[in-house]
Image: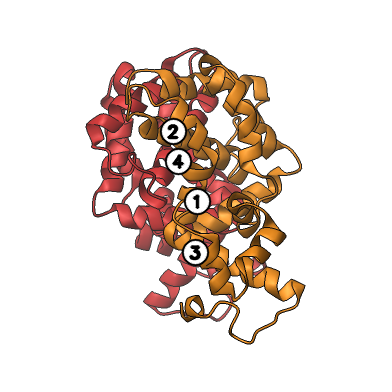
Chain colours: A red, B orange
Amino acid sequence: MTAVDSPGRTGRRPGNSGARTAILTAARSRFAEVGFDKASIRFIAASAGVDPALVHHYFGTKRELFVAAVDLPVDPAVVIGALDAVPLDQLGEQLLRTVVGIWDSPLGEGAVAAFRSIVSGDEPTLLRTFLIDVVLKNIRDRVDSPQGSGSARVALVASQMLGVLIARKVIGIEPLASMPIDALAAAVAPTLQRYLTGPTP
Amino acid sequence: MTAVDSPGRTGRRPGNSGARTAILTAARSRFAEVGFDKASIRFIAASAGVDPALVHHYFGTKRELFVAAVDLPVDPAVVIGALDAVPLDQLGEQLLRTVVGIWDSPLGEGAVAAFRSIVSGDEPTLLRTFLIDVVLKNIRDRVDSPQGSGSARVALVASQMLGVLIARKVIGIEPLASMPIDALAAAVAPTLQRYLTGPTP
């Protein structure tokens, strides 16, 4: 925390690579500590001993910094953003197809590695804030009916999707692991749809 | 593997504690390699350099050895066995209440620790064989209707239960993490029931 009081005054002048690494390390630590919403670029920059402008220059927005800090192969907000145009009554199926489509693609390996690293580590906040504050934020707002139910709805969706990830990609429970996406959607999409728009949880 | 050819002939005469540890290590390794069904007490005993009778003497049945080898706080087959008498149309809710009841009890901490250790390790077979061949075996046979669908049904059940475990006990996604069991059952039991006895997956 001492670096907070002296950003840029520590005498450190890291090279490009050193500054990037310092920023990523500070970012991961801060996101793990207080979550995505409460973490600030200013604080992270100070911890890394650099100017906030350099953080933006290297990584862009706070969300993009998060994606880089947890070493994700794809920006989930961009992927999930495609769902903003999907009608609510088709959201369960499209969410499943979109997310599992990533996991089954060449990008999936990196996603699974990031997941295992987070589950086994002592940073549960990192995965929680990723799912709730980054991935599912827009969906939560859309399904908040009746008002206040959105958090429970997306928490239930997250639970089923996490379970599919583990069963299909981490431990390989057959026949779910090699089930064609159409069959998987037929089985699991009704669950997601009920969590999203069914009876109030 | 060389020990297989010379069980009891290695000159090793480990004390009680040494033999127990050797058996547990050999058992965990073998279960992780070939799964619960294909692992034999004879092979494990040979790997540990002891007589098979000693394995039975220390640990009882193969299932009890498995429970000890993966350091579970409770024998899941005994817990799940209580579900054998539950009518099929109530199985989803009773399964959820029984399993989450364990996780929420003082035993839950050990169960979560075992789960995290397995997910983060390189032994996916261990968790898979535990879920499918030990925990869900009887249920799979009961819900195999139409014939051949039982494996997909319990794989889907496993996916939702794994997701609840992670969301509730590992990363703490609210409000699911602190949801009273009745509310959780109202939300998730219909999912489990549909997987168990609903349309063929």
Residue B113 picture location, percent across and down = 64, 53
Q: Which residue is mark 1?
A: B127
Label 3: state its secondary structure.
Answer: helix
Gap between marks 3 and 4 measured at Cα: 28 Å
Label 2: state its secondary structure.
Answer: helix
Q: Which residue is mark 3?
A: B30
Label 4: state its secondary structure.
Answer: helix
- Above or below — where is A7 with respect to B157? below
Q: Residues within 10 Å of mark 1 (few under 14, many from 20)?
A: many
Q: State the quadrant of the N terminus of chain A.
A: bottom right
Chain under numbered label 1? B
In the picture, measured across the screen, residue A67 lies left or right of residue B93, that is left
Residue A128 picture location, percent across and down = 53, 44
Chain under numbered label 2? B
Gap between marks 2 and 1 measured at Cα: 14 Å
Residue at the (64%, 51%) spot, across then down: B64
Q: Are marks 2 and 4 on the same chain?
A: no
Q: Nearer the viewer, mark 2 or mark 3?
A: 3
What's the amino acid at mark 2?
Val
What's the amino acid at mark 4?
Leu
Which comes before the other along the chain, label 2 or label 1? 1
